[in-house]
Image (cartoon, grey):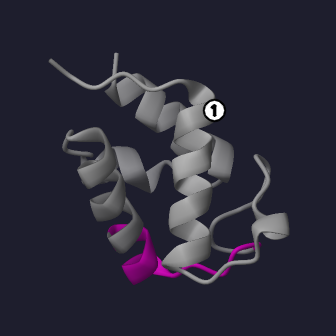
Amino acid sequence: MAKQFTREEISEKLTEILTDDFEIDEEKITPEANLFQDLELDSIDAVDLAVKLQYFTDKKIAPENFKQIKTVDDVINAIEDLLK
């Protein structure tokens, strides 16, 4: 059975990953923050983030789904959809 997480738990984990692994200041991480422009992730960082989120959710994130993601809120929404 898939793990279930609240939106808040997903947001907290995402913030933890972005601050610990990508050294992004926590105050920059807002729902509207663009991963590439505001948080300065590149395509390799995006792949690393997807892998870390797969470990968190125990679910495979399809690359085509991740290409649609632009903001922190998009990531949270995608994880919620994945866990349904």
Neighbour tally class for label 1: few under 14, some 14-19, many 20 plus, Cα within 10 Å: few
At which x and y percent is residue 81? 41, 24
Kindly indicate the quadrant of the structure image that contains residue 67.
bottom left
**Residue wearing tag 1:** 8
- The image quadrant where one finds the N terminus is top left
Residue 25: percent from left, percent from top: 76, 77
Q: Residue at x 48, y 48 (%)?
A: 68
Give the tally of numbered discs. 1
As drawn, which residue projects farthest toward the right?
Answer: 27
Please provide percent x and percent y for residue 7: 59, 28
Left or right, residue 31 beside residue 3: right
Q: For the magenta stretch, what is the residue range?
A: 38-47
Q: Look at the image and tell me in which quarter the C terminus lies.
A: top left
Q: Amino acid at mark 1?
A: Glu
| Residue plotted at (66% across, 42% down) | 73
Q: Is residue 51 left or right of residue 18?
A: left
Identify the residue shown where x is 36% and y is 22%.
Answer: 4
Secondary structure, mark 1, is helix
Magenta stretch containing residue 31, yes or no?
A: no
The foreground one among 11 and 75 is 11
Left or right: 38 with respect to 13?
right
Query: Looking at the image, which residue sits at the far left?
Result: 1
Q: Is residue 23 above or below residue 54?
A: below
Q: Nearer the viewer, residue 39 or 36?
A: 39
Instruction: Examine the rendered structure and indicate whether residue 56 appears above or below residue 78.
Output: below
On the image, the x and y values in percent for residue 74 come to 59, 42
At x 46%, y 36%, the residue is 78
